[in-house]
Amino acid sequence: MLTSISESDRQASVRYFDGHYETLVSGAYVVCAATDRKIPIEALRYWSVDLQEAYYDAAASQARMAKRVQEQT
């Protein structure tokens, strides 16, 4: 039996830019790169343009950047 996934259950595909983002595939949320938590699209405030990643909050963003710096050393 085939079931359709409603937009409210689907992860969005997003391209991040400075100060805004573009939704490529509509969905209800994106996943935080640092915490794996779902971020509702309407609550999306933090992301990396360079890494094309979303973050749940400022603390998650900071933790991800610190990990990236550590990986590069």
Image (cartoon, grey):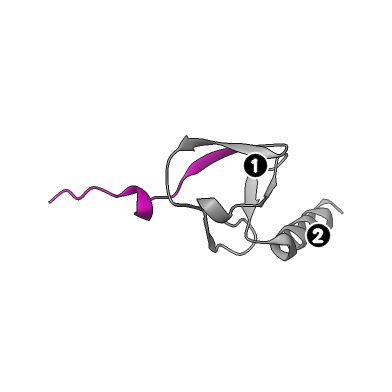
- The local secondary structure at tag 1 comes to loop
What numbered label is drawn on residue 20? none
Q: Residue at x 64, y 42 (%)?
A: 52
Mark 1: amino acid: Gln
- Across and down, in percent, residue 18 comes to 73, 37
Nearer the observer, 67 or 36: 36
- Across and down, in percent, residue 26 comes to 43, 41
In the image, the segment drawn in magenta is: 1-16
Nearer the observer, 19 or 31: 19
The number of callouts visible is 2
Quarter of the image where the C terminus is located: bottom right
Task: Pick whichever of labels 1 and 2 is earlier in the sequence.
Answer: 1
Mark 2: amino acid: Ala
What numbered label is drawn on residue 66? 2
- The vertical placement of 23 against 7, above or below, is above
How packed is label 1: few (under 14 Cα within 10 Å), some, or many (20 or more)? few
Q: Is residue 24 left or right of residue 56?
A: left
Q: Is residue 42 left or right of residue 56?
A: left
Reply yes or no: does residue 28 show up in magenta: no
- Find the distance from the CA under tag 1 to the CA under tag 2: 16 Å
- The vertical placement of 50 against 62, above or below, is above
What numbered label is drawn on residue 52? 1
- Across and down, in percent, residue 13 comes to 49, 41
